[in-house]
Image (cartoon, rainbow, N blue to C red):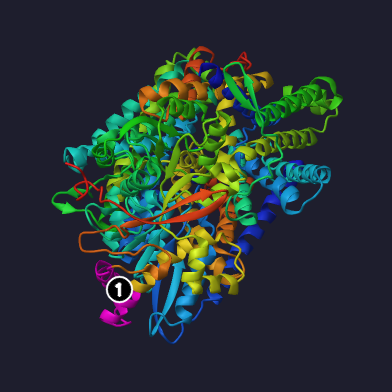
Amino acid sequence: MFSQLIVSGFLTGSVYALMALGIVVIYKASSVFNFAHGSIVAFTAYLIWSFVVQLHLNPLLAGILCLLVIGIISFLVQRLILYPLTGQPVLAALMATLALGEVVSGFVTLMWPGPARTYPDFLPSGLIRLGPATITLGEIVNFVVCTLAFGAFVLFFQKSRLGLTMRGTAEDHQLARSEGVRVNRIFILAWFIAILMAGIGGFLMAFMHGVNQEPLISLGMKSLAVVILGGMESISGAVIGGLAIGVLEALGAGYLDPIFGGGVEEVFPFVILLVVLMIRPYGLFGYERIERV
Amino acid sequence: MMKRPCGTFDQTYAQDMSYIRTPFRMGLLAVLFLLLFIGFPLYADDYLLGIMNVIGITVVAMLGLNILTGYCGLISIGHVAFVGVGAYTSAILSNHLGWPFWATLPSAAVVTGLMGLLVGLPALRIKGFYIAISTLAFHYIIIWVILHGGNLTKGVWGLPCDSVELFGVSLDTERRMYYLIMVVAVTGTILAFNLVRTKYGRAFVAIRDNDIAAEFMGLNIFRYKVLAFVICSVYAGVAGCLYAHYLGMLTVEQFPLIDSIWYMGFLIVGGVGSITGAVFGAFVYRLIDQVVIFLGPFIGQVFPALSGSSVAGFTQMLFGMVIILFLVLEPRGVNHRWQIVLSSFRLWPFPY
Amino acid sequence: MRRESISKERRCAWKVAILTVATAFLVLSASWAAAGDKAVVVIGHLPHFTGAYAATQAHYAPAQDDAVEWINRVNYIPGVELKLIWADGGTNPAKSLAGFKKMIAHKPKPVVIIGESTGIGTSLVKWHAKARVPDIEGGMSQAMIDPPSWTFCQPPPYASQFGAWVDYYLKYIWKKKTPPKFAWLTWDNPFGRSPMTKEAEAYLKSKGIQIVAREFIPNVPSNTASQCMRLRESGADFTFGGMYPSALSVVLKDMKKLGMLGSMTIGMSYATNLVELVNYVGNMADGVYITSIHPLVTEWEQKCPMVKEMYERNNRKANKWIYANCWSKFAIAAEVVKRAVQAVGPENVDGQAAYNALVGLRNFDAWGISPPISFSQTRRVGMDSVIIQTVENGQVVSKGFMATPDLLPGGKDVPR
């Protein structure tokens, strides 16, 4: 039972990690904690459903269209909401993302009312026995997609020029601006990447839950806990945080549920989170900023 | 902060300390109280009184959050869970033990305050946005306890709570409840106004602005942070007690996480870090709710082609957009705009 | 320079905002609809078009309009024009209370309000009593029915549904001589836990059945391997609980992964919409039973042609199952208003008249869209039978009515 719990928790955690990356990117670039992430995860899952299932577009075309839509949204969000809030209290920006989440989720209710949709089942459905644990091929595909996305993400940040610019901007906006970086565009790019990550995560999660707004929003909001566990500015922290939350949930449900009479799964990761924060107040991998007065 | 018209100077210490400094202000305040306690209930029907009652309870809860977040700079996204603790405490005491309201109110405040003490403890090490997560963790734990509380909280069944009885009068109508809620809300507001002018209030502000500097100045920041949590929770407990007696029936679903986040959000919309801002925030929160509920069926009438659920989606979008508009137009909160309006009145006809 | 232009932008935006609000109010006051010549009786509806219940209740939107349209068209209540007012509860008690108050403040006051959620209905019990407007409630909880007040629940209690499921299982599915083993498999929330009462477990014991496991699934499960594995180890033969299809589908997928699908018979209370479940997981849903309170779509399409007719006439695209579900509550409301009008005349109909009519309702067939409904002075539970439905080869089929034992605290079927 232990190995099964670890393996399935790990595989679920990989999707959490992917979605959490989206929050980290925005936070690193612009110090805005994106509360709209859950709604955006749901929205992108619906969007992909519309293109692929409803309009029967070919997957490549659908992908390009999705990227286009994501680009437009990132531009609008940055230009209409966050740009006017530049230099204003950070809390205002935080609240704006919360309101954005409400707008997005209202939009989903408006555009796609009614019951959950489902994707056609094109994931392979075979089973693999891994010692005492069983996993489905679909979960393997999930994991591979997450790993690929994460790899591309890291490559982009480490190797490409744009990635370097983004990292530089995250370090210091003023300095980046004086080097001729258009900070606003970098923010748009950060939103673009974040929504893309949310989209991939939402797509994978939607295979499990159907394209259904409420579950997707709450799963997307789980990245909140993941990010804080890992440390808000740390990419590797988000990954390890995601995997840890996935495994902790599985273990909590596995060993503590019988003792406490159920429902530990949702509480347990937060208790662990609290303990971790007491030991490492900046999350597992967050930067310990040296504060000066 | 205290902007006064030209020619008003303090000549004694008492004047300097007094909150109401000009006769004009005194007059305004008197008019406000008259309106609140006599004028409004005289003309308002149950519907308007009901809106005001909910606003009043929200004001009390919001004031507590404002002291924690606005003054001490600690973010809480578990505020509704504290309201829930207060509500359940008073409901359990009045339901199982038959305690009267004048006993449940302080007990709810005390129990919730102790809970706040517990939640504040991680502030010893954690700071900044990370402190929010400890409140989030406590939200989940509190909800879990309520749900699994067996016969005590009647977890899944709903816990009834009788309406308030004071001096032999049962406050079971909107109108009677209105006076109680308004008295509590006004008292809470006055206490909050005073609190932030004391040593504690100044310590909170110092910690918010820079906690390391505050520590250098000799403040025991841990103590003050925990104190801020306790005060915040006491307000939440009082609000919860009122809520329980007002609603008459508690279920765990009445304290969802999203409401905590909205409390935080509307505090920002109202104007974080000022008492009037918190009051504005509560008003805006509940009034936007009303507008959305009012607009929903109305839009349905104007555009019959839209189905009810599309209309609901549309109103939800509207809700978000109104808040974004508020923030983009006035990121420092409604209170900031209010102060600008006030000062331009004061200085009229000069531009500044 | 830059700041100045921003502030100019702001000032302009303020003007636009004020203008918009002003126009909105003008339009609003201009288009106030006039009433017809018949006496108008108002009924209220409090559905949840946003929030967690939105996916299901979105289908109530066309249904509420169609039902009222049909009632008025066929003159179901002679001499009365039924007017519907609604407010979106948003699956949130605070918002629902605001919506409720808004409806109560409507002139003329609604005579009944139809509620659509267990949690919200429970929150509003005292408010309905205070406003003296009965609530015809689609949800069901202990606090709503005991003590009897102004809330009238349509479905049978969850514990009683559970009793019906146990009876059905013993009668038709369990073939061996030894008693089967039972496990709870349910949502870890008020709705999911509500069948798990003392009375329900005593009923089980009186049949000689042992409870071998209690497994709880979180609201939004992502990985239920541990719960499923414990179920497998416990060797349970059948389960019961309450879950929405999206959550149950995750459990079924995990069961398939662990190779235990079909090793136990899964029973669910009425809110697990089998059509939606099949939509999610296809053949994996085979052998899941529910204690439904609504007939299959094919059945009501024959029995209640008007529902079908309205559905097609207005070109609705809603899920037919849920669409008819909403009609069943409007059937009760229409019947109640009709009886109240007969009793006191169309001008005097109010909440009290509707209450009296509700209390006098016996074996009302709800136009065939649900099992028969009865209430009385002390009884606040509408139905005393459920329809057992299941999935066979990806098709939802009905297994007929099953009487629900009375398993409320102090009920007559509770073993002593």
Total marks placed: 1
Residue at 55% in and 17% down: A3
Q: Nearer the viewer, residue B31 or A292?
A: A292
Res C387 → quadrant: bottom left
Question: Could you tell me residue B346's position as x and y percent?
Answer: 52, 50
Is residue B4 rendered to the left or right of residue C193? right
Amino acid type of the residue that numbered disc 1 sits on in the rendered structure = Asp
Quarter of the image with the C terminus of chain C is top left
Quarter of the image with the N terminus of chain C is top right
Residue extending farthest left: B168
Q: Does the magenta stretch include residue B79?
A: no
- Whether B175 is drawn above or below C107: the answer is above
Which secondary structure, mark 1? loop
Residue A162 in view, yes or no: yes
Is residue C375 rendered to the left or right of residue C399? left
Question: Could you tell me residue C301's position as x and y percent?
Answer: 51, 68
Q: Give the range drawn in magenta.
A: C337-362
Q: Mark 1 points at which residue?
A: C350
Q: Which of C352 and C405 is in front in this view?
A: C405
The chain under label 1 reads C
- Whether C39 is drawn above or below A135: the answer is below
- Whether C39 is drawn above or below A214: the answer is below
Question: Could you tell me residue C249's position as x and y percent?
Answer: 54, 40
